[in-house]
Amino acid sequence: MKEFTAAYIPIGVGTFHMPSAEKLFEESKALLTGICETTVCPEKMLLNTDLLKEYLDTIDPDLIILQNLTFANGAYAAEIMHRFRSVPLIMWTLREPVIDGGRLRLNALTGAFSAANTIRQFKDTPFEYVYGSPAEEKVIDTIRRTYAAARVKKEMSSLNVCAIGHTPQGFGFGRALDNDLLEVFGVHQDAIEARELIDAAKGFSDEECAEYLNDAMKRTRGLENTPERNRLDFARIYKAYDEFVTSKNIGAIASRCWPDFFTSFGTPVCAVLAMLNDLGVAAACEADMYGALSMWIGMKLSQKAVFFGDPVSLDEKENTITFWHCGTAACSLAREDTGAAIGEHCNRHIGPTMEFGAKESDHAVIFRIGRNPDGTFRFFIVKGKALDRPKQFFGTSSVIETEDSAEKIIHESVLAGWEPHYAVIYGDVSDELQILARMFGCEVTVY
């Protein structure tokens, strides 16, 4: 895959105050290349459409930073859109440097309206916008977050995901169509039956799986207390899953779990999914592909493992929502006092599964890619923080104090028909998710 590239396109005309424009041009280049060293910048300001066209001939961007350096008419934006209408774009308007009753130095804001009006005639998806000088924190933060979202969008174009088995009856909300994933998100989906990996696991010897068992022993606490047969079979299925995702270059999986791994294999897959999540492969259970994709996005934006679970409890007084699942959380999410403890499945009483409360975080985002009845997609985003709470139920849990009313979030999201699985991202990535949603043309619900 081609390396991510952003292109800085500073447009203007030479009839305004060039010393002011030149200074801001140099400061802007320093900012953008500091954020991303693969940002392509022109050697000089693009002060006429001929210079613009020559520069556009040299670039193949994954993100465009269109800067209104001074006023420029709509012909500049029309040329850019004619070539790159599908490329994510942020428009950056420079603040007028001096207001002293004298000459208008840049008139960039009028140019922004001219460019924006032209862009909307070409571009179906929204673009981002920021106003201010290169030294302003708001400008720096907005541009940095836009870069992060554009990187994720770029990576999704080469992302391979896999559905391992079918969703259980009544869990169709997680079943994704190949064409939807490819058309909307650029993601390629493979599919395999869970029995194929079970059969592969059954063919491994204890010796062949020893390294996987040793790896899990180092990551977890109490695995040695799991019955030997289940412990060894866990290592077998861990090896089968790891070798499969590695050989196929798969970044996210949606795996069937119950009843197959209990009835056909005798050992749950829960802890295997936890290991994969720790290794950077987004792994959702109950074959929820949109849940897995939500996890993958969260992992890329936060550079951390992501919790996956159901909203199972509301505390109006504490303003919290508890997310829980049977035991698939990444070991790295465990509280320090318990570590990544091992137990057995809450319903089937077979192990190993993960058994811990997730660690605290000053910033957390509840996130879900949802599918509307008409086939379009929407992003669910809730800001909050993860509290320091022990395990709430058998399995793994994370207690999130939301910024908005937790009671309101539950009430409105149930009425809106949102799915019952969510990714809990440990980091402040709400803005990046909203930018990414706009890049994909998806509806956004933010609480």
Image (cartoon, rainbow, N blue to C red):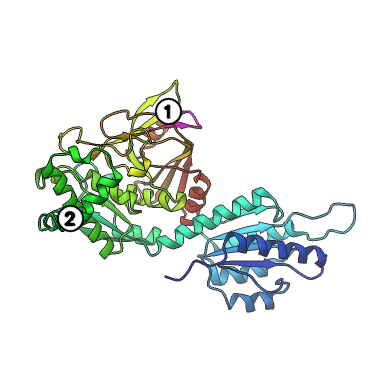
Residue 162 image point, x, y percent? 27, 57
Depth check: give the residue in front, 238 or 79.
238
The mark closer to the camera, 2 or 1, is 2
Residue 161 image point, x, y percent? 30, 58
Magenta-drawn segment: 400-407
Q: Which residue is mark 1?
A: 320
Q: Is residue 440 above or below residue 229?
A: below
Depth check: give the residue in front, 304 or 74.
304
Is residue 16 something that shows in the picture? no
- Sequence-wise, the earlier of marks 2 and 1 is 2
Q: Is residue 350 left or right of residue 105?
A: left
Amino acid type for the residue under numbered disc 2: Cys
Q: Which mark is residue 106?
A: none
Q: Find residue 420 and report its image quarter.
A: top left
Residue 317 image point, x, y percent? 45, 20
Q: Is residue 408 left or right of residue 307?
A: right
Name the secondary structure under disc 1: strand
Depth check: give the residue in front, 317 or 37.
37
**Residue 403 among magenta residues:** yes
Q: Which residue is mark 2?
A: 209
Is residue 171 something that shows in the picture? yes
The residue under the point 65% across, 58% down is 92
